[in-house]
Image (cartoon, rainbow, N blue to C red):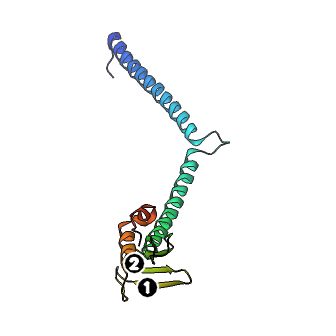
């Protein structure tokens, strides 16, 4: 075996010592990093008394799924109600008038009640001094199989125009 000089031995020891110091520094860095990760993981896991973040996330996802399922049901019910409401009364108007010249107070009236498609009914009540007569005529697509009076046509037109929901038709109705 060859003999090493003192200088070579010193160099080898210095290299080994340098590698050992680097390994020690690497070990310290790794231990500090592990300690930090353990602290962060402990925070995520919780303190043991309250729920950890994984349980909270799981519950939150279950709630979101439940809400999503219920929302689908609400949307379906709303669409069903929208389809049904197309056939409900949406347009209406009342035209008041004096059917006879000797009577005042606009006691006679015609009411138009229509759905989205223009189907519905027109009800006319004619008030006289001694009697009242009421007529109902069916409406299909804004037309009737029976002849319509001027007041009935006016009530249908007013309902279609959208004036049945306030008092504007009362001001627009002529006295007869």
Look at the picture and state if 56 lies above or below 138: above
Q: Nearer the viewer, residue 45 or 99?
A: 99
Q: Where in the figure is residue 106, as x and y percent of width and height? A: 48, 71
Per the rendering, the mark at residue 104 is none
Foreground mark, 2 or 1? 2
Residue at position x 48%, y 25% from top?
28
Which residue corresponds to the image point at 40% horizontal and 67% vertical from the top-left?
173
Q: Is residue 143 shown left or right of residue 38?
A: left
Q: Residues within 10 Å of mark 1 (few under 14, many from 20)?
A: some
Image quadrant for the N terminus? top left
Within-10-Å neighbours for mark 2: few <14, some 14–19, many 20+:
many
Q: Position of residue 61 (x, y in %)?
A: 52, 54
Check if mark 2's residue and mark 1's residue have beta carbons within 8 Å.
yes
**Residue 114 occupies which quadrant of the picture?**
bottom left
Q: Which mark is residue 152?
A: 2
The residue most toward the top is 7
Res 78 seen here? yes
From where the camera sits, is residue 90 visible?
no
Give the residue displayed 58% in from the left and 42% down from the top.
Answer: 45
- In this orientation, which residue lies closer to the viewer: 100 or 26? 100
SS assignment at label 2: helix
Seen in the picture, residue 167 relative to 7 is either above or below; the reply is below
Residue 65 drawn at (x, y percent): 51, 59
> In the visual, does 56 lie left or right of 89?
right
Disc nearer the start of the sequence (2/1)? 1
Q: Label 1, on which residue?
A: 137
Q: Could you tell me which secondary element the residue under label 1 belongs to?
A: strand
Where does the C terminus fall, quadrant-wise?
A: bottom left
Residue 160 in picture, x, y percent from top left: 36, 70
Farthest-out residue, right:
49
Q: Quadrant of residue 24?
A: top left
Q: Residue at x 42, y 20 (%)?
A: 21
């Amino acid at each position: 075996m060859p003999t090493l000089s003192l200088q070579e031995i010193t160099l080898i020891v210095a290299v080994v010592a340098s590698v050992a110091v680097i390994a020690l520094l690497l070990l310290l860095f790794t231990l500090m990093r592990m300690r930090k990760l353990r602290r962060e993981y402990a925070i995520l896991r919780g303190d043991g008394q309250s729920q950890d973040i994984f349980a909270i996330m799981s519950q939150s996802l279950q709630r979101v799924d439940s809400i999503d399922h219920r929302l689908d049901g609400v949307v379906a019910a709303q669409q069903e109600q929208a389809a049904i409401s197309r056939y409900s009364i949406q347009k209406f108007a009342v035209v008041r008038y004096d059917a006879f010249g000797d009577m005042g107070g606009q006691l006679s009236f015609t009411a138009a009640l229509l759905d989205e498609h223009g189907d519905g009914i027109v009800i006319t009540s004619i008030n006289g001094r001694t009697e009242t007569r009421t007529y109902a005529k069916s409406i299909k697509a804004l037309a009737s199989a029976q002849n319509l009076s001027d007041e009935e046509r006016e009530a249908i037109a007013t309902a279609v125009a959208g004036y049945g929901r306030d008092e504007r038709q009362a001001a627009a109705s002529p006295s007869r």
